[in-house]
Image: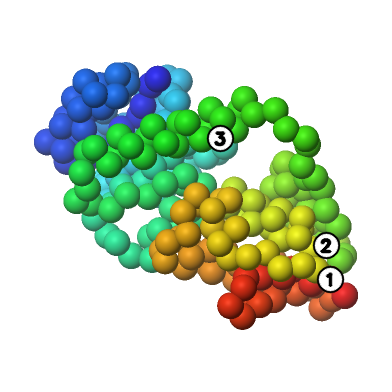
Amino acid sequence: MKILLVEDDPNLGMLLQDYLQLKGKFDVVLCVDGEEGLRAFNKQAFDLCILDVMMPKKDGFALGKEIRKVNENIPIIFATAKAMMEDKASAYDLGGDDYITKPFRIEELLLRINALLKRVSAKETKVAAPVQSQFQIGSYTFDYTTQLIQHNGQQQKLSTKEAELLQLLCLKQNAVLTREEALLSIWHDDNYFNGRSMDVFLSKLRKYLKEDPKVEILNVHGKGYKLLIN
């Protein structure tokens, strides 16, 4: 397994690289800024990316956005010293799979890497009944596979998390999607910060669907949410 590690602190970067190579048995390519990281990503094949957010030349979020243009599926972990809700929401909105706040224990990072790679592997190999991917939401059409909402000839590209959340709502159309079910299904953890991130995505989905008055995403107090189509 090959990991792209982009970290502008040379001491921390080398420490993480050595630990992940020794304990995790990973091949780790270390880059010191976003531009170097993007060049490395475009030249080599990686299985996972770890991106520091606060970096010179190109920050981690900008780098993550560039990586997602090339590869929509590669797991991305963002690392930052800022434990801000806006940063975490931005990380998930850009298609990040996990977010870790500095300072962190190296052992915790390794556990997160292994858990993320395990989930990706299970998702790729799992044999299951096909899940519905195309939906009619009032006057909107939603294609989960392409992550596109279309309405009156216009289309809106969704982030991965937005698409996953809207698919769950569509599968539960006119019924309650519990908050816990959504968090565990998409974020694999129902903690406070993930809940706040989900609130941000729900607000965006409501904005995307606002042109049809017959379509509503309702808060069901104490339970969760309901995609209501009248």
- Assign a secondary structure to mark 3: loop
Contact check, label 1 and label 2, Cβ < 8 Å: yes
* 132 on left or right of 72: right
Residue designated by label 1: 229
Task: Characterize the local packing of mark 3: few (<14), some (14-19) or many (20 or more) Cα atoms within 10 angstroms.
Answer: some
Kindly report the distance in space between the C-alpha atoms of the residues bearing marks 3 and 2: 26 Å
Tell me residue 227's x, y (percent).
75, 68
Q: Quadrant of the N terminus?
A: top left
State which quadrant residue 166 falls in: bottom right
Which residue type carries mark 1?
Ile
Q: With 82 as the anchor, is 11 left or right in this view?
A: left
Residue that label 2 marks: 137
Tag 3 residue: 73
The answer to which of marks 3 and 1 sits earlier in the sequence is 3
Judge the density around disc 1: few (<14), some (14-19), many (≥20) Cα neighbours within 10 Å: some
| Mark 1 or 2, closer to the camera | 1
Is mark 3 in CB contact (under 8 Å) with mark 1?
A: no
